[in-house]
Amino acid sequence: MTDFVRKESGLREEDAVYDALIPAGDGWMYDLEPGQVLRIVDLEGNQAVDTLFYDADNPADHYSAVQTIAAQESIYLTTGSVLLAESGKPLVTIVADTCGRHDTLGGACSAQSNTVRYAHEKYYMHNCRDTFMRLLAQRDGYAKRDLAPNVNFFMNVPVTSEGGLTFAAGVSAPGCYVEMRAETRVTVLISNCPQLNNPCNAYNPTPIRLLIWSP
Ligand SMILES: [Zn+2]
């Protein structure tokens, strides 16, 4: 894992225009202006942060894993990755990353996936899909159809040489962060994953910190 490229940010915390703590299992929805930089800090380490991006002026044009993976010819995200919308429009660019690798394939946990993967009794457990739905329902112009395949920041889903997906123990650590610059007006939707049944949160969901800088 030491071959990851990790890039630190030059931004200073005291210059941030926004600073918030998102408790374990909670969510966040926010509009970034072009040029603003969002930092997500994995405060305690190995916390999956399920995230979606939308063109704020045209929410139907949301983040596309397929467009992003095909354009950068890699399934992982790190510094330099440009996250594209379905239309091919750049939404955000990752400009710093001290974790080194983020997942594009694992998707969000849901009541249904908890049932299929673990046990029927897990159906009622809190999950990312419920958090996404709750936040989308509070916004005009967004609906169930806007729930698209998401990014999992700080989550480690290595692909085997046979093409298999593995939900593995995390590669992040306390204080690791990823930073992204908005390339247009972007709506960011986060579920700070409450999952307790696989190692994506080290079986212990923890808070994250969000910081924003203006250009
Ligand atoms: Zn989740």
Image (tube, helix red, strand yellow):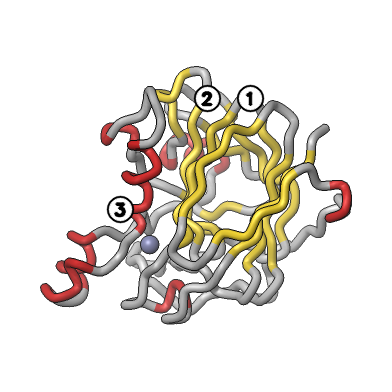
Q: Distance between the residues labelled 1 and 2?
A: 8 Å
Residue furthest out toward the top: 57
Amino acid at circle 2: Ala
To which residue does mark 2 refer?
A: 56
Spot occupied by residue 26 in the image (x, y as percentages of width and height): 46, 59
Amino acid at circle 3: Asp
135, 146: nearer the viewer: 135
Q: Please tell me which of labels 2 and 3 falls first in the chain.
A: 2
To which residue does mark 3 refer?
A: 130
To which residue does mark 1 refer?
A: 184
Residue 161, quarter of the rendered image: bottom left
x 32%, y 61%: residue: 127
Quadrant of the rendered image holding ligand 1: bottom left
Q: Is mark 2 on a helix, strand or loop?
A: loop
Q: Please tell me which of labels 1 and 3 falls first in the chain.
A: 3
Amino acid at circle 1: Thr
124, 73: nearer the viewer: 124
Q: How far apart are marks 2 and 3 (CA)?
A: 22 Å
x 38%, y 23%: residue: 141
x 82%, y 54%: residue: 9
Look at the picture and state if 35 lies above or below 9: above
